[in-house]
Image (tube, helix red, strand yellow):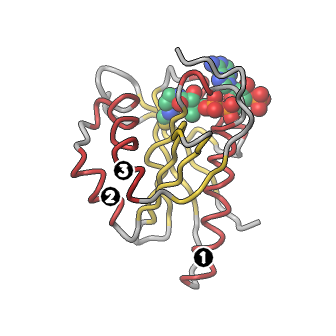
Amino acid sequence: MENINDFDGFVISQAQNKHLYTLTKLTQRYFPYANFTFEEVIRRFNDPNITYLVAISKGITIGFIDFSIKENNTVQLLGLAVLEEYRNKGIGKALMNAMFSKLNLIENERKMKINSIELMVAQDNLPAQKLYFDCGFEKKGLLNRKIFDKEVAIFVKDYKAV
Ligand SMILES: CC(C)(COP(=O)(O)OP(=O)(O)OC[C@H]1O[C@@H](n2cnc3c(N)ncnc32)[C@H](O)[C@@H]1OP(=O)(O)O)[C@@H](O)C(=O)NCCC(=O)NCCS
C-alpha cells in the first residue's frame, strides 16, 4: 500500500478525458459486478445527463463520484469510491458535498428543480451507509432482488438546493 504520510489534501473537480482510464480502473475495482469496459465509461462520460467528479491528490485520482439526472428530475447516484489508503479522511463526504454543489449549478443552468437523490448500496456496506445517513439520506427499503448474492438497500434524500 502506498505511503501517504505526506498526504496534504486534495481537490475535487469535474472529470476530464485524461481521467477516463483511471475512472475505468476504479469502477472495475470497486464495482466489478457492473462489468464496465473503458468504452462504457467513455459513453457515460459523454452522456450530457451524467456527471463525473474526481478527487485528486498530487496528480493521483484518489476517488470519484458520478451521478445521473433522470427525466423525472430525480438524481441517481451511480458510483462513489475512494482508494483504500485515502479513506477516513473526509474525501467521500467531500465528494458528496461537491455533488450537491454541482446539482445547485445544474439547477440554475437548466432552470429546473431536482426532486430527490436516490442510490443503491449493499445492505452490509456500513461505511457507505453511515456516510449516506450523515448526508441526510434515509433508507427506503430493500431492492426486490439480490445483486451478486447481496441484499441491496435503497436510499433516498429529498433534495432542496442550499
Ligand atoms: C464509502 C466510501 C466512499 C467512504 O469514503 P471515505 O473517504 O472513507 O469517507 P469519509 O472519510 O468522508 O467518511 C465519512 C464518514 O464515514 C465514516 N467511515 C469511513 N470509513 C468507515 C469505516 N470503515 N467504518 C465505519 N465508519 C467509517 C467516517 O468516520 C466518516 O464519519 P465522520 O464524519 O463521522 O467521521 C469508501 O469507504 C469507499 O470507497 N468504499 C468502497 C466503494 C463503496 O462501497 N462505495 C459506495 C457504494 S454505494
Residue type marked 3: Leu
| Disc marking residue 20 | 3
Indicate the amino acid at tag 2. Arg
Pointers 2 and 3 in contact (CB under 8 A)?
A: no
Residue in front for this viewpoint, 134 or 79? 79
Q: CA distance from mark 3 to mark 1?
A: 26 Å
**Residue closer to the observer: 72 or 93:** 93
| Quadrant where the C terminus is found in the figure | bottom right
Check disc 2: other Cα within 10 Å, few if <14, some if 14-19, many if 20+. Answer: some
**How far across and how far down the image is residue 5, in percent?**
71, 20
Dot 1 crowding, Cα within 10 Å, few <14, some 14–19, many 20+? some
Report the disc number at residue 107. Answer: 1
Q: Nearer the viewer, mark 3 or mark 1?
A: 3
- Which residue is drawn at the image coordinates 34% and 44% (left, top)? 21
Q: The residue tagged with tag 1: helix, strand or loop?
A: helix
Q: Is 11 displayed left or right of 43 in the figure?
A: right
Mark in the foreground, 2 or 3: 3
Q: Position of residue 88 (x, y in %)?
A: 69, 26
Q: Give the quadrant of ligand 1.
A: top right
